[in-house]
Amino acid sequence: MPRLTVDSWIRDRAGRILLVQRARPPFPGRWGLPGGFCEWKETTEACCARETLEETGLSVRVGELLGVYSKPGRDPRGHNVTVLYRARPVSGRAKGGDDAADARWFTPRELARIPFAFDHREIVMEQLARDRHRRSRSNAPGVSRAGPSTSRPSRKKRGLRAPRR
């Protein structure tokens, strides 16, 4: 039976990504996203906040669900399914803790020469591409963070109901 893990995707205002260096097997000395195993009766959001605090010293606000990674063989300990959340730091300073030897911020350019644990290189590259796509769409003409510009408010904003079928 697969086990559930939760990781966090944290970027600072400069666009750097927070990674932790593993202190224990598997992959000691390699880098990965902060995270770990979900405990009994713990929500995935609570797990994300707890593991991030334990491994990095940062308290975070857990945001949107970014992905679920379930490929068998991605973890040598067994079939583990990872849920990835965007998280925003609210307090603390990045430092390794618990089973993380170190916690550091990396620019996207620095990632090419970092040895990653598990399938985290692929996850990081996927999320960076999504972030780039999201930014390019928000900078497109006629598009704001609220969505495409329109000349007339939506039915919902005008208090109208959709026609019945």
Image (tube, rainbow, N blue to C red):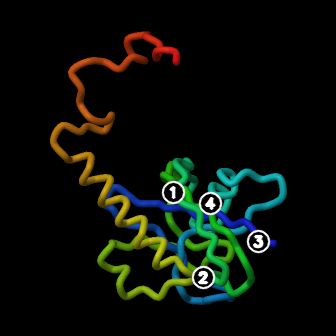
Instruction: Tell me which amino acid carries mark 2.
Output: Arg
Label 4, secondary structure: give it: helix
Instruction: Tell me which amino acid carries mark 1.
Output: Leu
Label 3, secondary structure: give it: loop
In the picture, the disc for residue 53 is 4
Q: Quadrant of the N terminus?
A: bottom right
In the picture, the disc for residue 165 is none
Mark 3 or 4: the one toward you: 3
Q: Where is residue 152 shown, x and y percent of the image?
A: 25, 18
Q: Earlier in the sequence, mark 2 or mark 4?
A: 2
Residue picked out by circle 3: 2
Few, some or many residues within 10 Å of mark 3 (<14, 14–19, 20+): few
Q: Where is residue 104 shown, x and y percent of the image?
A: 46, 73
Instruction: Answer with left or right where residue 67 lies relative to residue 38.
Output: left
**Residue 153 position (above or below residue 39):** above
Instruction: Tell me which amino acid carries mark 4.
Output: Leu
* CB atoms of marks 1 and 2 within 8 Å: no
To which quarter of the image does residue 107 belong? bottom left
**Label 1 to label 2, Cα distance in Å?**
23 Å
Residue at image position (63%, 84%) is 23
Can you name the residue that lies furthest to the top here?
Answer: 159
Instruction: Answer with left or right where residue 80 lies relative to residue 113.
Output: right
Residue at image position (72%, 77%) is 79
Residue at image position (26%, 49%) is 137
Residue picked out by circle 2: 22
Few, some or many residues within 10 Å of mark 1 (<14, 14–19, 20+): few
Residue picked out by circle 1: 66
**Label 3 to label 1, Cα distance in Å?**
20 Å
To which quarter of the image does residue 20 belong? bottom right
Can you name the residue that lies furthest to the left here?
Answer: 141
